[in-house]
Amino acid sequence: MSDHFHKHDQDTVLIKERSEQEIAGLTKRVEKLEKFLIQKGIVSKDLLESVANIYENDLGPLNGAKVIARAWCDPSYKKRLLDDATKAIKEMGFGGLQGEHMVVLENTPIIHNVVVCSLCSCYPWPVLGLPPGWYKDPAYRSRIVIHPRDVLKEFGLNLCDSVEVRVWDSSAEVRYLVLPERPLKTEKFCEEDLVKLVTREAMIGVAKAKDPFFSET
Amino acid sequence: MNSIHDMGGLTCFGQVKYDEDEPVFHHEWEQKVLAITVATSSLFGPLDKRRHVLEKIGSIDYLKSSYYERWLIRLELSLNELTAINQYQSTESEYESIDFKELEHAIYNGRPSDRTEGRQTPIFSVGDRIRTKNINPSGHTRLARYVRGRCGFIDRVHGTHSFPDTAAHGEGENPQPLYSVRFTAKELWGAEKYPTDNLYIDLWEDYLEPLDV
């Protein structure tokens, strides 16, 4: 136990839970906006629901995982992906807003890539969906560029000193996707099984792909 | 502008709070803010202008607000601006109506920022050494403070892209070459411990000057 009387922790101010009352207030403000836009004929309720549905259900990290698994299985696809990621991702049927200019970065035993947007929270929506909370929080945006190894350690990823860390700050409209290393002893896995090993975190570069033989017990 | 949004290199925000099972949206209002923002984006000018609206949120409010709370503030500010502009027009057809088919097409095909006009011939080549300018504009810029006045290497040439610093302010797209520039960790942070570590950031040609002349 800590023998400190009071912990002055700045991040509790930044990421505090909203009270019921605050949530009600936010909901009210959004409803006011929505009502105005519908009344003026700018959008319809159906249109807003359709857009929400696309981002909740159609675009997500499963798309990116399919791209990665294919690259692991198909050397010619991997080459196309590294040469022109936008085109190769389009081949799989994925593309669109926040994925207009894609670049894929290959992790190897000696190079580890990790992606951030320090200025806002740019993220490749067509292949990863909407960004998770931590990716948008000041803690990640500010610190991954200066202390990447410490931040990766907090995600449970300990890199050897000999590994080169490459941090990619997506400050323009180019969006980066990490091609993680294929887990060892998965030569007999089919593409479908490999997809399950590719997490969102692995494609951002704060984790490795799942090891199917790793057991926590 | 030099504001809190440009936070690369600060170390005052504690550890990253990682929640493996985080839902896409925590509350229904967040989902609505996302939908309204995507649906109405064409009403409020280029992406650079919309990013600048977020940057102009006061620093205290910026930090106290969640991501979608900032987006909500942006929608309110943008609509205030739009309605103030439109109050001088009395007809009912003053607002553009969003067509779902067109919007859906944009969502799945994107709005690319590369351009066939403007400066098409890059001044720099891969491997060239550059120094970033030390500029402190009062408006929008994507030259993060932590890479200003630093020496780096051209790593990739991304083609010619719309320039945020002017596009955000209605001063034209000024299309120009965009580069991925590599800086060593030592150059940026003085860190000697990991001499092989590097940071890559995308920078427009107007942010750069040649080093070996």
Image: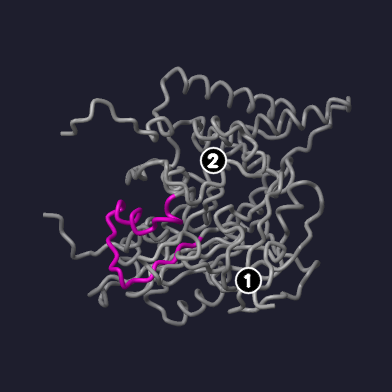
Front residue (pair B209, B124): B209
Pair 1/2: label in front: 1
Q: Please, which chain is the residue tagged with disc 2 on? A: A
Residue for point 49% across, 64% down: B199
Residue lying at the far left in this picture: please name it. Answer: A217
Front residue (pair A51, A108): A108
Residue segment shown in magenta: A143-168
Question: Which corner quadrant of the image does residue B26 belong to?
Answer: top left
Would you call the spot at circle 2 few (<14 residues within 10 Å), some (14-19), or many (20 or more)?
many
Which part of the image, by quadrant, shows the C terminus of chain A?
A: bottom left
Which part of the image, by quadrant, shows the N terminus of chain A?
A: top left
Would you call the spot at circle 1 few (<14 residues within 10 Å), some (14-19), or many (20 or more)?
many
Residue A22 visible in image = yes
Which residue is label 2 attached to? A52
Residue for point 48% across, 51% down: B9
Residue B129 percent across, percent down from the top left: 60, 75
Residue B124 percent across, percent down from the top left: 68, 76
Question: Which corner quadrant of the image does residue B157 belong to?
Answer: bottom right
Residue A69 visible in image = no
Q: Is mark 2 on a helix, strand or loop?
A: helix
Q: Residue B130 carries which label?
A: 1
